Image (cartoon, helix red, strand yellow):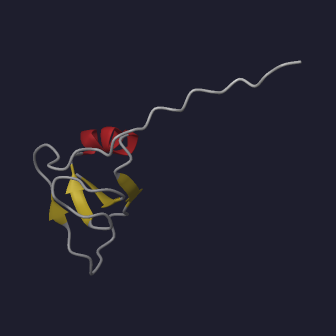
């Protein structure tokens, strides 16, 4: 299990919370922009909440780039 600090909502957990997720989930969560940082395994005063199941909050929508305008030439 990996301990991560969330950068975005995941499975009902708020950004900034430190949660435990399976090691295999970290690359996908990082790809989706949900990992703020991977937290060291040192004991801390931070409460760690295990996360099970799929995310309950959808990922934020990605906006398509605007088409480029071409100016008049000549």
Rendering coords of residue 33 (x, y %) = 39, 47
Q: How many marks?
A: 0
In the displayed structure, 2 sits above or below 45; it is: above
The part of the image, by quadrant, that contains residue 13 is: bottom left
Most foreground residue, 47 or 62 = 62
The part of the image, by quadrant, that contains residue 38 is: bottom left
**Residue at image coords 19%, 50%:** 57
- In this rendering, would 69 be left or right of 23? right
**Residue at image coords 79%, 22%:** 72
Residue sitting at the far left: 53
Rendering coords of residue 71 (x, y %) = 75, 25
Residue sitting at the far bottom: 45
Residue sitting at the far right: 74
Rendering coords of residue 68 (x, y %) = 63, 27
- In this rendering, would 10 be left or right of 56? right
In the displayed structure, 22 sits above or below 49; it is: above
Rendering coords of residue 16 (x, y %) = 33, 67
**Residue at image coords 15%, 58%:** 12
**Residue at image coords 37%, 63%:** 40
């Amino acid at each position: 299990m990996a301990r991560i600090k969330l950068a975005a909502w995941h499975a009902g957990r708020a950004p900034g919370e430190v949660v435990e997720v399976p090691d295999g989930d970290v690359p996908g969560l990082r790809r989706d922009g949900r990992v703020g940082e991977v937290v060291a395994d040192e004991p801390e005063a931070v409460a760690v909440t295990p996360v099970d199941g799929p995310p309950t909050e959808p990922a934020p929508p990605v906006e398509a780039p605007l088409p480029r305008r071409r100016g008049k030439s000549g």
